[in-house]
Image (cartoon, grey):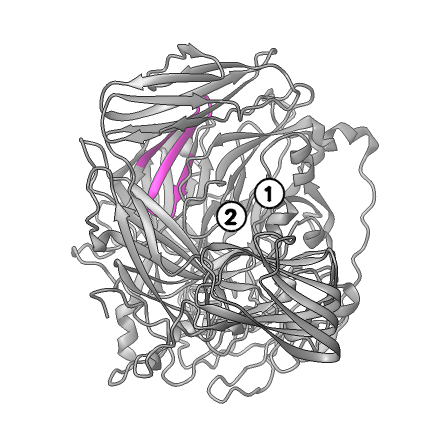
Amino acid sequence: MKTIHARAHARPRRTVAALAATALAGGALLALPTASAHEGHDAAAAADTDWGNYEKILLTKDVGEPIDMAVLPDQRVIHTARDGSVRLTDPATGVTRVVNTLDVYASSEDGLQGIALAPDFAESNQVYLVYAPRDADGDGAADTPSGNAPNALPAGEDDSYWDRWVGVNRLARYTWTGDSLDLDSEQPILDIEVQRGQCCHVGADIDFDGEGNLYLSTGDNTPAGTPGANGYAPNNDAPGMNPGFDSRRGAGSTNDLRGKILRIAVKDDIPAGTPPGEGSTYDIPAGNLFAPGTEGTRPEIFVMGVRNPFRIEVDPQTDSLSWGDYGPDAGAADANRGPMGYVEWNVVGLDDPHNAGWPYCHGPNAAYNEWNFETASPREFFDCAAPRNTSRWNTGLTDLPPARAATLYYGDQPGQQPRDELVNFGAGTGQAPMGGPVYHYDPESTAPGKLPEHWDGKAFLGEFSQDYYAALSVDWETHEVGDIEDFFPNAALAAAGMPANDNPMDLEFGPDGSLYVLEYGDGFFRANPDAGLYRIDYAEGNKAPQAAFTATPASSSAAPLEVSFDASASGDPDGDALTYEWDVDGDGTFDLTGPEITHTYTELGVYTARLRVTDGSGKRGLTSTSISVGNQAPEITVDLPADGGFFDWGDEVPFQVTTNDAEDGTETVCERVAWSYGLGHDEHAHPEVSGTGCTGVFPTDPNSPEHGEGAHLYGAVVITYTDDGANGLPPAAGEATLRLNPKLQQAEHAEVTGAEVVEDETASAGAYVAGLGKRDSLALDRVSLAGIDGVTAAVRGKGRLELRWGSPTAKPFATAQVGKARDWTDLGLSFRARTGTGTLYVTATGALDVDTLTMMGEGVGTPPAAAESSTGPSGAGRTEGEQ
C-alpha cells in the first residue's frame, strides 16, 4: 500500500489565504469562488456507500507499461502496453497472455495506445486500436529518424528540415478471432500527422455514440517544457525554433487533427488496401464543428482546443461526451503571461461542437498573453470570445470559434478551484484527470458484483497523480455538477487489506456492472511492479480472498529447475482461513496444495504457474506468473552515473552500462541497450530523449526549470537490455532505473518531519520550511553525493544546521552555525565526497528556517561543449556511434 511517506517529494499544498485570487481572466486577477458543501446522501442507501461492502480484486500484475483496456462480453479483458504488446487476461483462470505484438514507434509517449470494441462487436468481432506505426507507408524503412529533434533549426537548413520528423498515429480496425487479433485483417481508418523526435501528448482514446459514430481524442503534440513557456501556453514560433514548440499549429488550428476530439462515421465495408481518409474509409456525420468543404478546416473536428484529452467517454444514454484534459505546469497566475496550470474535466452534449480554448484560454476561460517568444516580452492577451491564430505555422483559419470555459477545473492546492474535493481526495500534489464512464444500473442483472443503484447516472473519473477515483453527480440536461464523491478511497482499501489505488490509467464498467480499473503504478516509461488490472465489486458480506505468491527462482538457463512457491502474501479481508491450490505447469489441473510448495521443472520451456486461494464460503482469488526454464533475463549494471547523483540543468550526464546474461555471457551488444531520459515532475514524467548504446550522455534541458514555478523536477532514466533468447525460448529483457537530482533543491520538496511548510512569495519557488529544530528533519531520499563536497543552505534564524546520512539520528558528517540571521543567509557546509545512494537528512538545533539547499561540486554532470549546445540539449541525444 502506498502511504503518505511515498508522497514526500510532492510539492506541499498551499494555504487558501496564500492562493486566493490566482485565476487570471483577460489579464485581470479574479477571486475564485469558495468551495461549496454538497450535503446529504440518502440514508436508505447507507449500505451502498459503506466501503465495507466493496472489494478490489487483482486480476493480473502482468500488464507491461499499461495504456488502455477493453472488457469483452465474457468479462475477459484485452489491454495494451506502449511497446506494442496486446494482452488478454481471463479472470476465470487467472491467466494473462501476450496475444499480439504490433511493430510500433515507441519513443516519448508514442507507441501502442487506445483500444475499443466496435458497438456491434458481438456480431462483427471488430476491435479498434490507435498506434504509432514505425513504417506507415510500407516501404520497409522507418518513417522518421530514431533520434531526437533539435530545439532549433541547424545551420544551413531551411524549414523543410522539420519534414523529416513527421510520422503518423494511426486508427485501425482489426478482427478478433476469439483469443487474439488477426493482424492481417488490419484496415487503416485514419492517420493523424504528428511530429516525432520530441515529447508529448498523444491522446488516442476511442469511443462510440448511439449512432455508431466513432470519437477519437488526439493530443496537441507539444512539449510541456517548451523553451520560454515557463509553464504557460507553449506558443513559441520564434525564428528558427522547432515548430513542435507551438501548440497553435495543432490544437489551435482549424486545419489540423492534433489537440482535438474527432467524430467520424467508419464505413462498414472497406476493400483491402484502401488508403485511410475521408470518403474512402470514413464519412463525416452531420453536426461537427466545421461543415465539409469549409476552406482552411478539417471536417472531422468535433471539439478543438484541447491539450491532452487522454481519456474520453461517449455515453449514448445521456447523449453526452466527457473528457479529462491535462493542463500546463505553471504553479501560479502571472499578470504578464496568464493563468496557473489548471486541469479540466468537461462534459457537453453530442449536439454541441465547440472550441475548448487551448492554447489561447484555459480553465475558467482565463486568457493567455500572446507572448513574444523572440523578445521574451508580453503583447496583448487573447480574446476568449474571438481568439485569433497568428502563428507562422498555422495552416487554418485566423479567426477562430469562441473559447469555452471548462465544466470543472482545478489546480493542485485547496483554494485554487471552485470544488476543493478534487484535491482534498488525493494524497499528493500534481493533477492528471482521467475521464471515465457513466454508470447505468441494471435492475434486471443478476451479476453478483454489480455496483448498486446509488451510482446510477454518475460520471466516474480517475486522478492519476493523486491516486483516487471520483463519482460526479451530473444534471444531464444542464451538465452542471452536483455532489463529487470519493469512490472507494485508499483509507478504506488499507483498512480492508486491499490493494491501494495507484495511478489510475483507465476505468471501464464491464457487462457485469463491476468497475474495471487499469493502474500504471509509480515509475515512468516502464512496466512498474505496482501496476495492475483490477475489478471493483459490490460485495456486501463475505469478501473474496486476495491471491499473491512468490516463485524463487523464476527463471534458469537449464533444466531441471527446482522452484519454491510461497503464498504467504495472500490474505482474506474477512480474516477467513484459506485453502491453497497450485497449477504449477499450466496444464489446467490444480494438483498441489498448501501455502508453500516446491516443484521441479524437468524440461525447457515457459510455464504459467497459477495459485488459487479459497475461503470457507467458496469465494476464490486467482493469480499467475511465468516461469522460464532455459532463458534468464539479463542483468544491467549502470557503472555511471550514480543513482541519485546531482547535476546542473543543461549538463550532459555521461553514462556507461554493462550487462551480464546467463546464456549470452558478459559481452554486451550495445545496439540492444535502449535508454530513455525524461523530466520527472512531482508524480509524473515527460519523456524527452531516447537512444541506444552502452555509453553516451543524457542531455538535460536548461529550460527545465521553466517547467512551472514550484514544481519538483528531476531526471528520470530507464535503461533496458534484451538478450538473444536461448534454448528455443523468446528473448528476455532486463531493466535498470536511475534518478538524477538537480543541485538546487527546494527544502519544501523534501520529506518534512516536525517543521512547517510556509508559503511566501519572496522565498525561492514560493515556499520554505519554517522552525526546523530538535527532533525535526528534512529527508532527501534516493540521492548520491558522488562528486559533491559541500552544501550551501539558504537559512535564517539561530542555531546549528547538520547533515546526516541514512538516519535522522546518525552522527552528523557536516555542521555549521548560524548566529542570528533575520534575512536569508547562505550557510556553507563542507565534507568529503561520499559513496552510495541513500537518504540525506538535514537537522538543526535551535530554530532555523530553510529555503534551499544547493549541492556544491561537479556532481555527475558536465557542461556541454559550446559548439554542441547551439541546438539545445534536446538534440540528437548522442550515444556511442551516434550523432
Quadrant housing residue 17: bottom right
User: Residue at label 1?
Assistant: 2
Residue 135 covered by magenta stretch: no
- Would you call the spot at circle 2 few (<14 residues within 10 Å), some (14-19), or many (20 or more)? some
**Main secondary structure type of the part rendered in magenta:** strand
Q: Nearer the viewer, residue 606 or 744?
A: 744
Give percent across and percent down for residue 40. Answer: 83, 41
Magenta stretch: give its range: 78-99
Q: Position of residue 604 (x, y in %)?
A: 22, 24
Query: Which residue is found at the position 65% from the left and 35% from the top?
Result: 494
Residue 214 % position (x, y): 44, 48
The residue to which callout 2 is attached is: 522
| Residue 57 picture quarter | top right
Instruction: Indicate whether 770 appears above or below 287.
Output: below
Distance of label 2 from label 1 (alpha carbons): 10 Å
Foreground: 602 or 617?
602
Q: Is residue 288 visible?
A: no
Q: Is residue 94 magenta?
A: yes
Amino acid type at circle 1 is Lys
Compared with residue 543, is residue 669 higher up or lower down, i.e. above or below?
below
Identify the element where label 1 is drawn: loop
Q: Amino acid at mark 2?
A: Asp
Q: Are marks 2 and 1 in contact (CB under 8 Å)?
A: yes
- Is disc 2 placed on a helix, strand or loop? loop
Q: Quadrant of the C terminus?
A: bottom left
Res 208 seen here: yes
Q: What residue do we see at 45% from left, 52% from top?
A: 524
Relative image position of residue 387 (x, y in whole percent) = 56, 76
Front-lying residue, 528 or 831? 831
Between 272 and 679, the one lying in front of the other is 679
